[in-house]
Amino acid sequence: MSSSTPSTRKTPHQKRANGQGTVYVQNGRTGFTAAAYDINGKRHTKQFKYKKDADAWCADQERARKSGQSTYSPYPKMLLKDFLHQWLEVQPINNENTYRSYLATIDNLVVPFIGNLKAATISPHAINKWLGDLVAEQYSKGSLDLAFHVMRASFKYAHLMGDFPQNPMLRVKKPKLQSKPTKQIPHEDFQKIYLESAKDPFMHARVEVGMMMGLRPGEVHGLQWSDLDQNSKTLTIERQVQRSKGKGLVYMPVKTKHSRMIPITDEQIRILVTHRRYQDLQKASWKHQEDLIFPNSVGGKMDAKKDRRMFDDVLKQAGVKHYQCYQMRKTAYSNLAHVTDSATMLQYTGHSSISTVMKHYAFASTESMNKAMDGMDKLRPVVTPIAYQSSDSAAS
């Protein structure tokens, strides 16, 4: 019986039904080459040592194609940073703040770390390492949650559209971090800031609506004099100023989508009216007339950066540490929580859930804790002092 050796010459393609792929041997190579078309009609080849593995690969490609699944990305060389920017541009995001926060997350938290990796082949290991690096850099829980959300939403969309054959985020777990909510300004610094702001009518009114009424910065920038009703002693909050892509500063509905009316005191009206009298002296040089209570230097919409700079100047003059503008709102509602009921808190904040208000705005202060302990002292039963005998005298 004669023996035969395996041939390495190119053999005819194995005949298969349409769509089942092809397995063959190429000249000068050992093993088998398998070829198949993906869902996008692009031909792919892969080398195998054994024919059974090549046949199995072809069968997998056929099953995926018939079920509408992608096995290869039509964008194999696209970098993660380009993919995320393109994904963001096709999302139906109507809220400008959401768009800006997504873009900032991509540019600041993703691109510097893993932006140059290929999106189609990025591994769960690489993503886990990236998240670990963010934790090591001590980014906040909110920042990490948003970064994780952007990655998860973008890859889910790309996988659903057939752009990527795999979704690596399905095997990635979000880091567990404890949130550290921004708290109110301590009472001692609150007093220093308020007294310093009172030296200028504009800043006095600005700090009053922020640190006493609790308006959001965007709501402050959107206030118009027509919102002030001196007869009914009310202030209506129905718009905010936000920066819109390609449009600049624009008026938008308030965050909760519902306007609210809050009562104000005679002293608050006096502070606002004083500010208005000084403001009227400057109107002759204005380029814009938008009836704004807190405009910029030419009567137009106030930019958030300029607002922060002005607040920072007050902090420096007051000799206190740095605080964020938003902490004025926290301070107002932390103080309000100690002097009123839950229903009033909801009306002032514009929220619909008291649990949200208590979690994010109502913080205990040193003064309130001392007051609570004084109250507990009053509940203690009165004990008549008695003379205690020493252990030696008791034994005798």
Image (cartoon, rainbow, N blue to C red):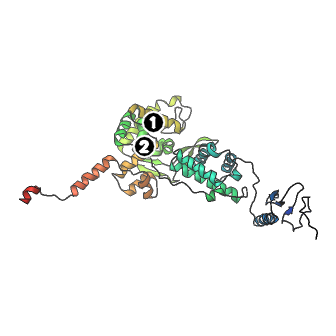
Pick whichever of labels 2 and 1 is earlier in the sequence: 1
Identity of the residue drawn at 8% across and 59% down: 394
Residue 2 percent location from the top left of the image: 94, 68
Residue placed furthest toward the top:
285
Picture layout, residue 107 above or below residue 172? above
The answer to whether the residues at label 2 and label 1 have Cβ atoms under 8 Å apart is yes
Q: What residue type is labelled 2?
A: Met
The residue at the far front in this view is 1
- Residue where numbered disc 1 is placed: 311
Residue 299 locus on image (x, y percent): 53, 34
Residue 20, percent across and down?
Answer: 83, 66
Q: Nearer the viewer, residue 265 or 147?
A: 147
Going by the picture, which residue comes out furthest to the bottom?
A: 1
**In this rendering, position of residue 367 left or right of residue 5:** left
Q: In which quarter of the image is residue 61?
A: bottom right
Q: Which residue lies furthest to the right in this view?
A: 2
Depth check, front residue: 300 or 79: 79
* Residue 362 point in image, percent of width and height: 39, 52
- Looking at the picture, which amino acid does disc 1 mark? Phe
Direction from residue 317 to residue 113 in the image, left or right: right
Could you give the CA–CA distance between mark 2 and mark 1, rounded to whole angstroms? 10 Å
Residue at x-position 56% and y-position 49%: 132
Q: Mark 2 points at which residue?
A: 328
Quadrant assignment for the C terminus: bottom left
Residue toward you, 6 or 285: 6
Element carrying mark 2: helix
On the rendered image, what quadrant is the N terminus found in?
Answer: bottom right
Residue 387 seen in the current view = no
Q: How crowded is mark 1: few (under 14 residues within 10 Å), some or many (20 or more)?
A: many
